[in-house]
């Protein structure tokens, strides 16, 4: 399911898959509000615009649409797009954004926009497979990284206009200043305002979104190196140093200069950035033992340390071999004063794996409430007003749901019950981006398993 934070034992174990980004709350920072009309013919810029008949299910041929088997009270299938073919050992396909009237998905060497009924709006073709993408675009534009020359699997960058299907610029990724680190292994990419932060094994850079050129960002302390970036509403940079010290910096998203620096307590460094606004980070030592979860103020001062007690927590953080993808964790959410974290799974009287969502007061670090559904697994998605929006995962017999939890906790209330007809496909989208926006729930795969013609890539549901 994800990284395990055992509060009592203090151990992180890497495993699992993806969910909703930590900096999406409240209101989903990834969702755009740009309303320019989509082009209806060739754009005259890099990329092509293509129309298609499409169906409500997004399925090809004469297959019965799952909406035909819709039961009373179940959501309608708005979009269902099958996965394309994949290499035998599978392939990562990072990059998914919800826009007004369409969604955009990076799929190997293409970035494709799908309309509400599965029709293709446009396609931008690249010279290599997309290997890194930010959760949050800037003004409807996203910097993506894709395969470069030779054996460099992530050596090129491009800026994609997510509303009009244009590639606005395309250039080599900045070279590392350390010798022998030019292959951009484990590329992490975060975007905020006018800047994007890049980190890879042995190197890092800050670039301008407008033209992709390197920006002279604020200096690190002597003997220190960048571990990774997280973006969204602000751009954070984590670093560690030769003298075993470490810290976190907020960069001005217009200039790249350092707004503040938070020195991490001795013996630890930032392991994950759960949220950039408010700032919530986890700490770990060199042996991956947890140093807890810390909330910071807007000025980079310690606001609180969460009182995790003896419980173990398990957000979805996936695998990060090189430790360069600081903002990768999903299955968490934050509002200005509250942080939501899922516990480790446990049996519940034979009713199946169960977890709880715990809400923590960021002013005090104390737990405010816990919420669970017996026999179900809950993952925070985002915050809407004072309510937490969460995903109730499917079981062997029941489909999933989108649920809401009020400001005082309690049992979740169902907002959208997904169809039983798509339960198997939903289970197959375990490694996925999940977004609930304007009453519509989107699930988009982060990885092609190469499991066959029935593999799904995108599904969307509405009341």
Image (spheres, rainbow, N blue to C red):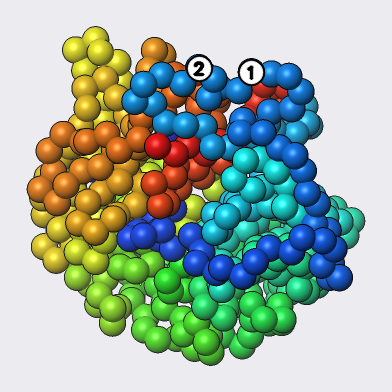
Single out the residue that lies furthest toward the right. Answer: 150
Q: What's the distance in space between the residues labelled 1 and 2, CA to CA?
A: 9 Å
What residue sits right under mark 2 in the picture? 69
Q: In the image, 396: left or right of 293?
A: right
Say which of 176 and 95 sits in front. 95
Kindly state the secondary structure of the residue where label 1 is placed: loop
x then y, percent, for residue 407: 14, 51
Q: Quadrant of the C terminus?
A: top left
Q: Is residue 409 above or below residue 62?
A: below
Q: Is residue 52 above or below residue 62?
A: below
Can residue 216 be seen by looking at this rendering? yes
Image point (75%, 39%), residue name: 53
Kindly state the secondary structure of the residue where label 2 is placed: helix
Q: In the image, 197: left or right of 61?
A: left
x then y, percent, for residue 62: 73, 19
User: Which mark is on residue 64?
Assistant: 1
Image point (72%, 52%), residue name: 121
Say which of 304 and 396 sits in front. 396
């Amino acid at each position: 399911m994800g990284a395990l934070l055992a509060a009592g034992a203090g151990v992180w174990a890497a495993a699992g898959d993806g969910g909703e980004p930590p900096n999406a709350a409240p209101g989903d920072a990834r969702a755009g509000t740009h309303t320019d009309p989509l082009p209806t013919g060739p754009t005259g810029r890099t990329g092509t615009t293509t129309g298609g008949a499409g169906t409500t299910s997004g399925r090809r041929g004469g297959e019965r649409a799952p909406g035909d088997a819709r039961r009373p009270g179940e959501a309608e299938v708005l979009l269902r797009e099958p996965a394309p073919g994949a290499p035998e050992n599978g392939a990562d396909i990072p990059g998914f954004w919800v826009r007004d009237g369409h969604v955009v998905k990076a799929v190997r060497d293409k970035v494709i926009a799908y309309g509400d009924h599965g029709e293709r709006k446009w396609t931008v073709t690249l010279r290599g497979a997309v290997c890194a993408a930010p959760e949050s675009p800037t003004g409807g534009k996203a910097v993506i990284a894709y395969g470069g020359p030779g054996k460099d699997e992530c050596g090129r960058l491009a800026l994609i206009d997510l509303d009009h299907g244009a590639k606005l610029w395309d250039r080599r990724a900045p070279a590392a200043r350390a010798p022998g680190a030019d292959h951009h292994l484990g590329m992490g990419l975060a975007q905020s305002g006018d800047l994007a932060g890049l980190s890879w094994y042995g190197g890092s850079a800050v670039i301008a979104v407008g033209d992709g050129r390197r920006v002279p960002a604020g200096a690190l302390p002597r003997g220190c190196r960048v571990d990774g970036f997280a973006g969204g509403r602000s751009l954070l940079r984590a670093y560690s140093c030769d003298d075993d010290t470490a810290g976190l910096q907020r960069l001005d998203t217009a200039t790249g200069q350092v707004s503040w620096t938070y020195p991490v307590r001795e013996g630890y460094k930032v392991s994950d950035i759960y949220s950039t606004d408010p700032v919530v980070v986890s700490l770990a030592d060199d042996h991956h033992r947890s140093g807890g979860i810390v909330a910071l103020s807007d000025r980079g001062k310690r606001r609180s340390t969460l009182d995790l007690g003896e419980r173990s927590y398990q957000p979805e953080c996936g695998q990060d071999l090189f430790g360069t993808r600081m903002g990768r964790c999903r299955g968490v959410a934050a509002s200005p004063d509250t942080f939501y974290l899922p516990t480790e799974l446990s049996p519940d009287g034979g009713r199946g794996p169960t977890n709880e969502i715990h809400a923590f007061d960021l002013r005090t670090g104390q737990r405010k409430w816990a919420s669970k559904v017996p026999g179900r697994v809950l993952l925070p998605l985002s915050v809407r007003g004072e309510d937490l929006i969460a995903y109730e995962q499917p079981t062997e017999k029941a489909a999933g749901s989108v649920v809401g939890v009020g400001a005082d906790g309690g049992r979740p209330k169902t907002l959208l019950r997904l169809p039983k007809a798509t339960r198997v496909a939903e289970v197959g989208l375990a490694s996925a981006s999940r977004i609930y926006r304007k009453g519509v729930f989107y699930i988009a795969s982060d990885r092609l398993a190469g499991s066959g013609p029935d593999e799904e890539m995108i599904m969307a549901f509405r009341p």
